[in-house]
Image (cartoon, rainbow, N blue to C red):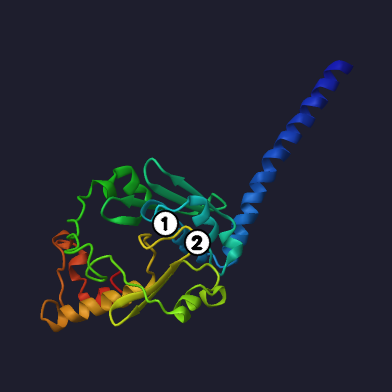
Amino acid sequence: MFGVATRRGSMRRVLRLSMFLMAVPLLGIVGLSGWLAFIRPELLPILSAYAVKTVCSNVFIAKRDADAVIRTDVQIEEQRFAKRMKIDIDTANQRVEAAAYGLFARRYAQYAEGRGCTLIAKDEILAGDILDRPPPPPLPPPTAQDALWPTGETTQLSDSRRLRAALNDPVLQGPGMRAIVVVHDGRIVGETYGEGFTASTPLLGWSMTKTVNAALVGMAIKDGKLSLNQKGLFPQWAGDARAEISVADLMAMASG
């Protein structure tokens, strides 16, 4: 009887210990979920999307080192979240996945040849929708590769000592300098690049891209090739709500 009672007592202790060990991570997840819901939860999907797009573009387009990109580029004001972002890079499929703590606000970015990196949903991955789209037509090659920039890629740098000194001044460069290019009278007269960057390294344009696009669209409108109220912009948009998106909607980033 004593032996039976001892075995039953041991089993109860093992059972209680097992329940305790299962409860600890569960309570941790519940507590973490509650904390994330209380501390600006709207930041999580934004941070995840920012992380996957940034890493995808820099790794698969700019061909930069993945660890360096995660260490230096996934930097935002809310560092408490950035440091807890788990980022996985699928080199074989050219895809990036990120989630806070590896669990929350999961987002994906996919690289496609000729299209760059695009934020995608889980069902698009399963359907292979992004990769099945035909690539856009290639850009025409430069008419004279050896001509001076911007017609070609050749530069004729200034021999000004003051300019060279300014370009190589760490104080003027600022932390994390990647590229400085000085253009005068339509020609590149000075340039310098940070470690790991060259004249051929693609860089994210961020809001500079909006300015360039606005100028190009404005020129097209002036030439009568576009109008702000123009709709039905692409054949692929016919037959659904996207047909009602206007040029003005796109320029105001209000296309939905």
Label pair 1/2, CB-CB below 8 angstroms? yes
- Left or right: 188, with 43 as reference point: left
Query: To which quarter of the image does residue 215 belong?
Result: bottom left
Q: Position of residue 197 (x, y in %)?
A: 44, 60
Q: Secondary structure at mark 2?
A: loop
Query: To which quarter of the image does residue 119 belong?
Result: bottom left
Q: Which residue is mark 1?
A: 58
Check disc 2: other Cα within 10 Å, few if <14, some if 14-19, many if 20+. some
For marks 1 and 2, give the CA distance. Answer: 9 Å
Quarter containing the C terminus: bottom left
Q: Note whether residue 253 is visible.
A: no
Q: Nearer the viewer, residue 20 or 190?
A: 190
Q: Position of residue 234 (x, y in %)?
A: 16, 64
Q: Position of residue 151 (x, y in %)?
A: 22, 70
Check disc 1: other Cα within 10 Å, few if <14, some if 14-19, many if 20+. many
Q: Position of residue 169 (x, y in %)?
A: 54, 75
Please, is residue 162 above or below residue 139 in the view? below
Please, is residue 96 above or below residue 160 in the view? above
Name the amino acid type tagged 2: Asp
Q: Nearer the viewer, residue 161 or 240?
A: 161
**Residue that extends furthest to the left in the rendered view of this protein:** 224
Q: Residue at x 62, y 61 (%)?
A: 35
Q: Which residue is mark 2?
A: 73
Name the amino acid type tagged 1: Asn
First in sequence: mark 1 vs mark 2: 1
